[in-house]
Image (cartoon, rainbow, N blue to C red):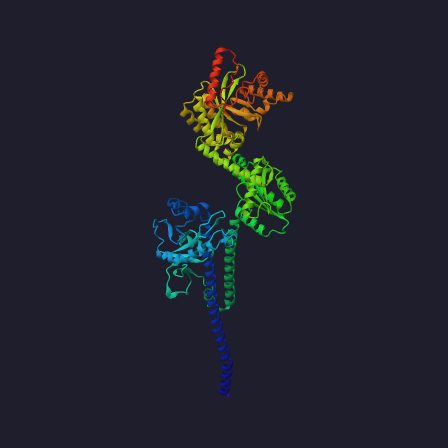
């Protein structure tokens, strides 16, 4: 019975154990197979994610390269410099090739002409013939796409002409194509962009563009950038191998013509295999290991994607916003205006563009430093944004210039209400350390559709209105009207004519004598610049001097007057020559050196030269101005304060600066009949000059009554039509000769009438 029992027990045991063993083996094999399958799936998924990250990094770098070309290809000067049949190779090399090499690392540059043939080639390694037939074949299709998109960007107008109206890609401002190419067996990043004008062009025929081609090697620096963006390891570039194409951890690099030119390899992470290796020794921790590793991979991918997304978002924000104020920048503002003009609703509302300029912001930078100027910009940006947060958009378009977009401008009164609020926001001083700064602003307004419906036109007219507000005294606003545009064109023409007149040495000088009050002896003359164009109609100094100040011509005009006055005055012995110096000329870093050169060239004694400056010279930079005045005094040059009392008169700088002469403005000398108060003010001004030991000169003397009254107050010298009108050099010589002749016959001569006076 026992054997039977044993057999039955063994059979039962086998019946139980073997199936259980088989189940366990099958389960283990199934679990092991599942782990291997899961490991392979995880590894492949990770590799695919890494492939997408690396591909995205490559695309991002290529797009960045195209954007870096914008400053060169969207440029009027480059458009016209590259369009002609004869190219300035030196200019192209310096401004296209070397500039982009230094700023963006583009090692090779080429221009593809309108006939698809290279017109310029440059390489940082001096192998300028890099654009061979193989490279041309690789890039031909990309260049052709750029040319086609450029040509298709011309829209036929009703007149039969074509207007250049490109449809750029989102967030881009150029027509470009990017890819990877091979040069001498080495892969390069490649970008081709059409060179287009900044301003709108109208043409009768559509012509292909000149295409700028830039390449940059995929070197260690670029690979490091890929590593930083993607988070991958051991990224390298290898030659293409057809036998393992589409296998392994690599991305095939293909030229625009489809040719495989290389492979971008990296060492992939293998989370599935790592998980499998960890769980094999200890099967009990299988689930925990798989879960931990899976969570790690998921978290890693999420973090990498989040970093890439954040980096891209930051790049977009930085490209469209001002770093200091956080406001939209100029290009972003243009986009906002364009969108507002297209989406203008309701149609009964206008779209207002307001340009804002901070008054005398440069003085803040000069006196308190750029850190204080930056704080002012941030404060102004915040205050103005708080005012119009619900009405429109604030933008910073340059150093001290802001712009407002009011897309639903109900009417002019509503706009002025907003502008009043903006001005009121700056009524409270801005505290910078211990300084409380009062910042004013000038504003120019243009409103669509009344002033135009195109973005560029509206912005230009707002700028013209801003210029009008500034020229009318600052701290105010102006709405655009067509007469302003005519005024700007007139000033522009005057500016060009003035420059040509200066180049041709066609300016003139008139000299107005000054006499002593006691014996009426001529002791000084003031040099006055005159401009009489070819048409014979004189342009008043009050018109052309501000233009010269704005264009920078005032320095050359000032030194031209100084040189001519010294040259003419050699013939007038013992007479002081007084020359006006503008604030800009006085602050020129080589003002004193050029003055010395002028005196030496004309052999003119410094003691016979008097420099006239106005009070505006002394707004800020007191120490620098004092040093300049001290140097002039050491040379023996006399210093006169012109138009005293008409500006920012301050007793403190009268005491600190070494003036020799105090010139009383004609507004005061002409007011002696206005009452006792006006005469008392004149008396106080003259007494002040006496206390400070200065020579007092009264301007605008029109009659003997004024002459006698001012002489009685102690005025030393007189100047005005009563003494003599402004004379040209020859007429002044005759005038002085007549005076000397009369003086020889009479101890107290009267002033002679000039024989010939300037017009």
Q: Where is 301 relative to 613, above or below?
A: below
Q: Nearer the viewer, residue 363 or 551?
A: 551
Q: Position of residue 280 (x, y in %)?
A: 46, 68
Based on the displayed image, in which of its 4 quarters is residue 504 positioned?
top left
Q: Residue at x 53, y 14 (%)?
A: 750
Is 215 displayed left or right of 456 in the figure?
left
Up-down relation of residue 26 to residue 242 (above or below): below
Query: Would you say residue 12 is visible in this rendering?
Result: yes
The count of marks equals 0
Can residue 226 be seen by looking at this rendering?
Answer: no
Image coords of residue 758 (percent x, y):
50, 24
Residue at 48% x, 11% y is 744
Quarter of the figure with residue 426: top right
Extreme residue in the bottom direction: 1
**Residue 272 at x, y percent in the picture:** 47, 65
Pinpoint residue 608: horizontal percent, then vertical percent.
46, 21
Q: Nearer the viewer, residue 151 or 444?
A: 151
């Amino acid at each position: 019975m026992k054997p039977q029992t044993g057999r039955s027990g063994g059979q039962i045991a086998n019946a139980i154990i073997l199936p259980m063993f088989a189940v366990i083996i099958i389960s283990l094999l199934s679990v092991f197979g599942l782990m291997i399958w899961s490991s392979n799936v995880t590894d492949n998924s990770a590799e695919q994610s890494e492939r997408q990250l690396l591909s995205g990094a490559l695309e991002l770098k290529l797009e960045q390269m195209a954007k870096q070309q914008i400053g060169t290809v969207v440029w009027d000067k480059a458009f016209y410099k590259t369009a002609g049949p004869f190219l300035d190779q030196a200019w192209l090399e310096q401004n296209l090739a070397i500039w982009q090499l230094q700023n963006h690392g583009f090692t090779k540059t080429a221009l593809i002409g309108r006939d698809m043939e290279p017109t310029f080639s440059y390489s940082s390694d001096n192998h300028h013939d890099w654009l061979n037939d193989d490279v041309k074949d690789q890039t031909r299709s990309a260049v052709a796409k750029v040319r086609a998109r450029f040509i298709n960007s011309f829209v036929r107008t009703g007149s039969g002409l074509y207007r250049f109206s490109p449809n750029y890609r989102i967030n881009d401002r150029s027509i470009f194509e990017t890819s990877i190419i091979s040069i001498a067996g080495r892969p390069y990043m490649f970008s081709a962009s059409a060179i287009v004008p900044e301003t709108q062009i109208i043409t009768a025929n559509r012509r292909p563009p000149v295409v700028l081609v830039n390449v940059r090697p995929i070197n260690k620096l670029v690979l490091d950038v890929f590593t930083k963006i993607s988070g991958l390891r051991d990224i390298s570039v290898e030659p293409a191998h057809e036998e393992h194409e589409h296998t392994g951890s690599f991305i095939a690099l293909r030229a625009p013509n489809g040719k495989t030119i290389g492979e971008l390899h990296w060492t992939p992470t293998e989370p599935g295999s790592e998980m499998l290796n960890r769980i094999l020794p200890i099967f009990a921790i299988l689930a925990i290991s798989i879960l931990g590793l899976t969570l790690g991979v998921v978290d890693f991918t999420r973090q990498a994607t989040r970093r890439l997304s954040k980096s891209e978002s930051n790049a977009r924000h930085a490209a469209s916003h001002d770093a200091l104020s956080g406001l939209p920048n100029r290009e972003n503002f243009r986009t906002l205006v364009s969108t507002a003009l297209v989406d203008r609703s309701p149609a009964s509302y206008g779209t207002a563009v307001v340009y804002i300029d901070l008054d005398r912001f440069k003085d803040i930078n000069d006196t308190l430093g750029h850190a204080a100027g930056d704080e002012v910009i941030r404060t102004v940006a915040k205050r103005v944004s708080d005012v119009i947060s619900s009405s429109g958009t604030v933008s910073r378009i340059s150093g001290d210039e802001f712009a407002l977009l009011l897309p639903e401008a109900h009417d002019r009164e509503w706009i002025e209400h907003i502008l009043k609020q903006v001005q009121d926001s700056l009524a409270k001083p801005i505290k910078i350390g211990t300084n409380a700064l009062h910042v004013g602003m000038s504003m120019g307004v243009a409103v669509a559709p009344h002033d135009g419906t195109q973005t560029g036109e509206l912005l230009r007219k707002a700028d013209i209105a801003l210029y009008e507000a500034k020229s009318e005294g600052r701290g105010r606003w102006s709405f655009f009207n067509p007469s302003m545009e005519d005024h700007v064109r007139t000033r522009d023409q005057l500016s060009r004519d003035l420059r040509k007149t200066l180049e041709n040495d066609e300016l003139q000088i008139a000299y107005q004598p000054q006499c002593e009050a006691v014996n009426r002896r001529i002791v000084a003359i003031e040099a006055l610049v005159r401009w009489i164009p070819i048409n014979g109609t004189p342009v008043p100094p009050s018109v052309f001097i501000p233009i010269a100040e704005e264009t920078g011509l005032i320095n050359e005009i000032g030194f031209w007057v100084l040189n001519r006055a010294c040259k003419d005055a050699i013939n007038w012995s013992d007479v002081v020559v007084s020359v006006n110096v503008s604030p800009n000329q006085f602050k020129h870093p080589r003002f004193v050196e050029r003055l010395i050169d002028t005196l030496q060239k004309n052999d003119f004694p410094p003691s016979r030269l008097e420099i006239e400056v106005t009070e505006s010279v002394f707004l800020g930079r007191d120490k620098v101005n004092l040093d300049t005045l001290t140097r002039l005094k050491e040379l023996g040059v006399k210093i006169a304060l012109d138009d005293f009392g008409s500006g920012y008169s301050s007793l403190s700088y009268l005491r600190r600066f070494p003036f020799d002469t105090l010139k009383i403005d004609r507004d005061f000398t002409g007011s002696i009949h206005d009452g006792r108060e006006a005469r008392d003010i004149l008396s106080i001004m003259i007494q002040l000059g006496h206390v400070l030991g200065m020579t007092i000169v009264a301007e605008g003397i029109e009659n003997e009554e004024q002459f006698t009254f001012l002489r009685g107050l102690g005025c030393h010298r007189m100047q005005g039509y009563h003494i003599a009108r402004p004379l040209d050099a020859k007429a002044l010589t005759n005038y002085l000769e007549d005076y000397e002749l009369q003086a020889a016959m009479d101890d107290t001569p009267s002033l002679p009438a000039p024989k010939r006076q300037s017009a």
